[in-house]
Image: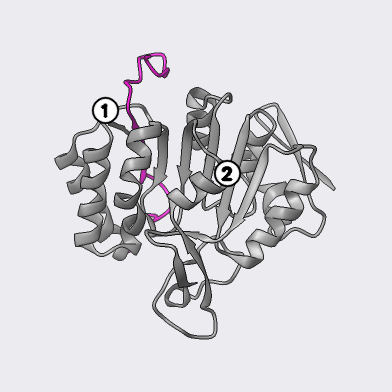
Amino acid sequence: MIEINKNNLSFYICDDTIRKDWFINNYKNWENFSFKVIDDLVDYDKTFIDIGAWIGPILLYVANKSKCVIGIDCDHVAFDSLVKNVNCNDFKDNVKLEYAALYNKNKLIYVGGSKRKSEWGSSEIKFTDEKDLISKQISGVTIDYLVEKYNINDCGFVKMDIEGGESVIIRSMSDFFKIQKPILYISVHPHLIQKRSLIRTIKDLFDIFPYVYDINYILLNEEDTINRFVENKTKIKKNNMKSNIGHELICTFKKINTKNEIIN
């Protein structure tokens, strides 16, 4: 086992986990803005759902503190390492792992990523219609399936990073969000979504959540956010902007105050 430290918190990963060197060399400074959001806003007395858990960089961080963490991922290589990493720690029974893709229906679907020359375990696997050498058919499950299976009635925080799949499932999660009222921390992927779907996804977020913030806790409006993401989609396509930063949104049912705290 290898001990990993971040923000005065430690956990273990397996010796043969994929991206072991990334955990050792890069994790300490990886997406510090995301961990600030987590440290500021997560209620550890409620269930935390990690959609697109990959090998566990977020899940392992919150698992020691959380009442319950549910991680879901559709990449069989990453999921294997996720299971091993979780088992290296004494999380008891508060971590539940689901090998599947969150989807808008319960059905078999294809996931892959050959258009980007993705490899299994890379964190870039996504929904695909291509039935080629990399794609794989797995179970697509709805949020209602997870709610029933794991008896989720107190979800406080959802982290979603699924390589463009957000455009497929956000609307289907509307009732779940409105009933359980968790905070949604979502990475939108404008370069992986068609323009029309990108606009619809952002509209759906503003329709569901009364408040949408950027990572600096600045309250956003729908029109400006749509324009920014559509513009960034073009910039990324022209290689004038990185694709992996600047597209995170914090969606809430309660306001965030100037101390970066949720106002009850």
Q: How many marks?
A: 2
Instruction: Return the residue found at the far left.
Output: 223
Q: What residue is at 27 percent from the left and 58 percent from the top?
A: 233
Q: Which residue is mark 2?
A: 150
Question: What amino acid is at disc 2?
Answer: Tyr
Q: Is residue 126 left or right of residue 88?
A: left
Binning the other alpha carbons within 10 Å of mark 2 as few (below 14), some (14 to 19) or many (20 upward) gives few
User: x and y percent of residue 2 in the render?
Assistant: 82, 46
Give left or right: position of 149 versus 167. right
Instruction: Specify the farthest residue to the bottom.
Output: 132
Residue 229 image label: none
Q: Secondary structure at mark 1?
A: loop
Tell me the element at label 2. helix
> Does 30 sit left or right of 157 as displayed?
right
Q: Amino acid at mark 1?
A: Leu
* Residue 21 appears in view: no
